[in-house]
Image (cartoon, helix red, strand yellow):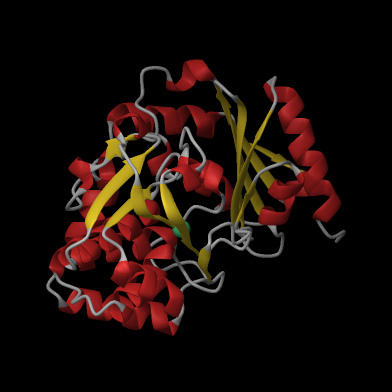
Amino acid sequence: VKAIVEELRATGSVLMSLHRQPDGDSVGSTLAVAMGLRRRGKRVTVASPDPVPRSYRFLPGADEIVGWAEVEGPFDTVLLLDCADPERTGAPRPLRSYGRVVVNIDHHATNRAYGDLNFVDPGASSSAELAARLLERLGVVIDRDIALALYTGIATDTGGFRYSSTTADTHRLAARLVDTGIDPGEVSEAIYEQNDPAALRVLGRALSTLRLEADGRVAVMELRRADFEGLPPGEADSLGIVNFARSIAGVEVGCLLREDEDGIKVSLRSKGRVDVGAVCQALGGGGHPRAAGATLPGPLPDARRAVLAALAKVLEPR
Ligand SMILES: [Mn+2]
């Protein structure tokens, strides 16, 4: 962290990027650090490969995020948070062509320390938790706006403080953030209660395909392209459809298969006994032990077979 703090103290301009299909942690941790750096007099540009989902557009600075086509360099520093691998930024050119130093801050266990400077802690609940530690080391005062962004990252990546990645430290940090004057109820409403009715209908279609496999230990749902036609990207994701599959009694892994232009997007969620991060890595994807994803070639029934075969290998016999 020391080398990163020194780099960010010395830098004049910073390019940051969200990851593809940005979630609350990607948007929250990145905007928090961007605000902190701007307050220290740095010129900061935040790029994103995909539009910011509607549920995170209330965050200060979200409307200043630009597409990669608008990025003009060069910058002193390229700084990424929550990007398990550099491909996730969707940058059209190698990251090193945008700046002389690439800094990588993340909590994904699959992160391979691809930066020149790396701060990777898989024990952290979220990249926002790491962002808070960094801002503190930079001497940035965490005000209400920064707290709002950090809180959003932590609350979304811990599933509302429900996952076991939530530690006493996570709660202590959240308490400090709430002390700045943010209202957790308002944040929850902004994130979870702005659903598009069309997205809920997509959820309904997914639920209607629910099937139990592997002796009731895997629940699978499917979405075909026609099921979410016309819905802005990310809108259905924000409902956490796959979590409904995991929520069933006796189910260890929830699975959502979704037809996409690149193939079949697979999302897996585990209650903890099965490491779905490893399963998705074997399928060419990645993620966390309890939440991971991969993209497989279609058609859908083939992808379904491949996922169930990969899960059968790791499900311990009862
Ligand atoms: Mn994250």
Does 31 appear above or below 214?
A: below
The reply to whether residue 210 is visible in this rendering is no
Residue 104 percent across, percent down from the top left: 48, 60
Nearest the camera: 174 or 122?
Answer: 122
Across and down, in percent, residue 10 comes to: 31, 69
Q: Quadrant of the C terminus?
A: bottom right
Residue sitting nearer the eye, 131 or 194:
131
Residue drawn at 49 percent across, 67 percent down: 163
Q: Quadrant of the N terminus?
A: bottom left
Whether residue 163 appears in this view of the structure is yes
**Observer-nearest residue: 111 or 180?**
111
> Residue 68, relative to residue 225: is it above or below?
below
Q: Is residue 160 above or below residue 201?
A: below
Residue 193 falls left or right of residue 249: left
Residue at 52 percent across and 34 percent down: it is 207
Residue 265 x, y percent position in the rendering: 59, 33
